[in-house]
Amino acid sequence: AELTLDDARYLVDERPLVGDYCLVSLASHVGAADRDAVVREIASLLDGLGLPVRFLAHFGSLVPGESRGDSVMHDRVIGAMRSPASVITPTTSEEAARLARAAALVVSSRYHPVVFAVPAGVPAIGIPVDDYTGVKLRGALGNFGQDGVLPVEELVAGRGGAVASRVWARREEIRENAARLSDEKQAASADWWDRGVRALRDEPSIRPRAAPAPAHRPAASAGWRTARSRCCRPRRRAG
């Protein structure tokens, strides 16, 4: 199997300054886990980081102070935290990418914050809540040699702090790996697309075919036209 890069990895490509904050994006979906336990354990993990914590909703309201989508989960976690945290109102995809790439650490149950962060060498903790999100987060992390996967079952079992400590301890190695792999991965991704285009161009069985000429359609009978006219005629609303 060949892991390919998500195109969103190239949304913003400038090399950012390393920030001092942890960027957090959490979907409201927690799978089969107990929501209160998830909130409590994420709050405990974030309190133990010793970093300023900034929450960014990838699905939420554009109106400051209005709680919708991810912000509902964020508000609950902030309410359970002992340390202060700030909230960033979503702006554009590019700005979300820049915030992830400039963070000291990313904690997310969503996919794209991880996709944005790892090519820039930002340590990331992905929290999958089911098999589907597990495949996506493992792929996004593994592309650049990261392994900070914290399944929601392990989170609620109290193992979040240990995973966070392990990921944070590797932060210099993670940055060095990303710097070393970035050009190689980009070249491999370009080559993958080029091979796909060549395969489509050279394989006769999958070339686009001309659309067939429309078949002759017999004229509708008078009876069918009458039935259709009655069926589709606008009806007057009663009352």
Image: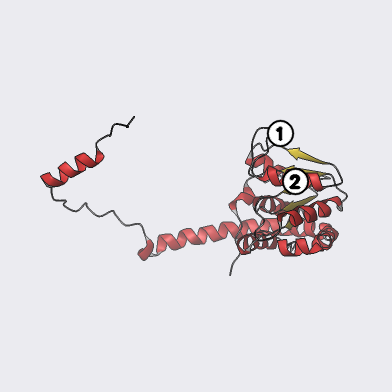
Q: Residue at the far top: name it.
A: 239
Q: How is the image coloured?
A: secondary structure
> What is the residue that sits farthest to the left in this orientation?
222
Q: How many marks?
A: 2
Q: Residue at x 24, y 42 (%)?
A: 231
* Coordinates of residue 154 in the picture (x, y in percent): 75, 64
Q: Circle 2: is it few (<14), some (14-19), or many (20+) Cα within 10 Å?
A: some
Within 10 Å of disc 1 (Cα), the crowding (few <14, some 14-19, many 20+) is: few
Which element type, helix, strand or loop, lies under badge 1? loop
Residue 205 left/right relative to 217: right
Residue 171 x, y percent position in the rendering: 82, 57
| Numbered circle sitting on residue 96 | none
What's the residue type where badge 1 is placed?
Answer: Gly
Residue 230 in view (yes/no): yes
**Residue tagged by mark 1?**
65
Where is residue 174? Give x, y as percent: 78, 59
- Indicate the amino acid at tag 2: Arg
Look at mark 2 in the image and give the residue it sits on: 76
Residue 71 on image: x %, y %: 69, 42
Q: Which element is circle 2 on?
A: helix
Assign the C terminus to one quadrant of the image. Answer: top left
Q: CA distance from mark 2 to mark 1?
A: 14 Å
Q: Earlier in the sequence, mark 2 or mark 1?
A: 1
Inspect this view and state whether residue 151 appears: no
Q: Residue at x 80, y 51 (%)?
A: 43
Residues 201 and 17: in front is 17
* Image quadrant in which you'd find residue 93: top right
Residues 209 and 219: in front is: 219
Q: Residue furthest bottom?
A: 1
